[in-house]
Image (cartoon, helix red, strand yellow):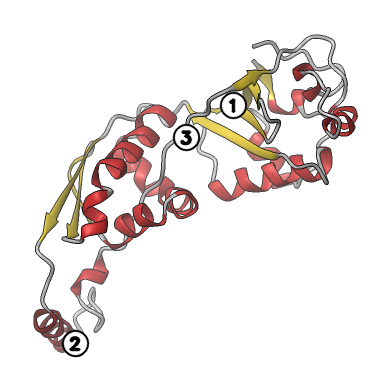
Amino acid sequence: MKQFFQVFQELTVSEHLRGMFLNTTISRITLKKDRSKLSIYLHSDHLLERSDIREMEEAIYKQLFIGKKIAICIRESFHLSSQYTAKVLYEFYEKSLLEELKERNILLYQMMKQGEMEWREDDRLSLILEEQILFRKEEKECIRVIQKIFEERCGVPIHFTIRFVPAKKKAEEEEDRANAALYASSENPGYSAEGLSHAYAGAEGSAGYPETGDMAIQAGEAASLSQESSALSDGNSASADFFPKNTNLRC
């Protein structure tokens, strides 16, 4: 494996972004056979925000592949300390998980956003949702994605389940809001007039999405990425061409 900035030596980014990626490593880079996506497999000992990863993908595209019909995708994985339980990870990674779910599957995002999070233990999470047909159809997918992001990407075990409860009738919801408003008017903190359910605003994220038909990009005496960008247009570039000059990343 190579350090990130040993592979992308000529990349110019902000001081913050450089600091976040400085000690990360790259294990391999793959290119889809139709040359539409370049995937970078990144490893880090600390969490990376989704926004930072997106900013780095954009920097790579704009500086090395501008004008080409290719998507840059960083596939991150984390090697975290034993202090990270599933509950602790959720607290620190919630924003990024929500952002990713919103990009990948809006229904899963809505499920995690609307549901009530119930932590029974540090590694046991139950998502409580009102019964909805669309949510019920996505139940297995939601469980798969959450477990994948925690266990495969972050190396943190989690037991994640979903429990559906009958949807409230309109009259019951209005009564709840009225009770909440009455409670709030007595200057008791913790609830709003919008209803008790709004006290639970949590969410999590998605999992990696496997690719098929990728070509592993080997190291060796490779040409620069800037030279490859011109070769992309005629479709004759070899997989090794995706490494900057003097880069020896070996898979």
Mark 1 Cα shell of 10 Å, populated few (<14), some (14-19), many (≥20): some
Q: Residue at x 54, y 40 (%)?
A: 48
**Nearer the N terminus, badge 3 or badge 1?**
1
Q: Residue at x 9, y 63 (%)?
A: 166
Q: Helix, strand or loop at disc 1?
A: strand
Which amino acid does the dot numbered 3 rest on? Answer: Tyr
The reply, left or right, for residue 159 in relation to residue 26 is left
Q: Helix, strand or loop at disc 3?
A: loop
Q: Helix, strand or loop at disc 2?
A: helix
Quadrant of the image containing the N terminus: top right
User: Disc 3 vs disc 2: Cβ atoms closer than 8 Å?
Assistant: no
Does any portion of residue 244 appear in the rendered image? yes
Which amino acid does the dot numbered 1 rest on? Answer: Tyr
Which of the 4 image quarters holds residue 196?
bottom left
Task: Identify the residue under disc 2.
Answer: 181
Q: Nearer the viewer, residue 81 or 156?
A: 156
Q: Nearer the viewer, residue 148 or 210?
A: 210
Q: Nearer the viewer, mark 1 or mark 2?
A: 1
Which amino acid does the dot numbered 2 rest on? Answer: Ala
Return the mark for residue 209.
3
**Nearer the N terminus, badge 1 or badge 2?**
1
| Residue 182 spot, x, y in % from top left | 14, 89
| Residue 251 spot, x, y in % from top left | 64, 11
Vertical placement of 126 versus 232: above or below? below
Q: Nearer the viewer, mark 3 or mark 2?
A: 3
In three-dimensional space, the C-alpha distance between marks 3 and 2, rounded to whole angstroms, equals 44 Å
Q: Nearer the viewer, mark 3 or mark 1?
A: 3
**Nearer the N terminus, badge 3 or badge 2?**
2
Task: Identify the residue under disc 1.
Answer: 41
Does any portion of residue 87 appear in the rendered image? no
| Residue 198 spot, x, y in % from top left | 26, 71
Vertical placement of 165 versus 69: above or below? below
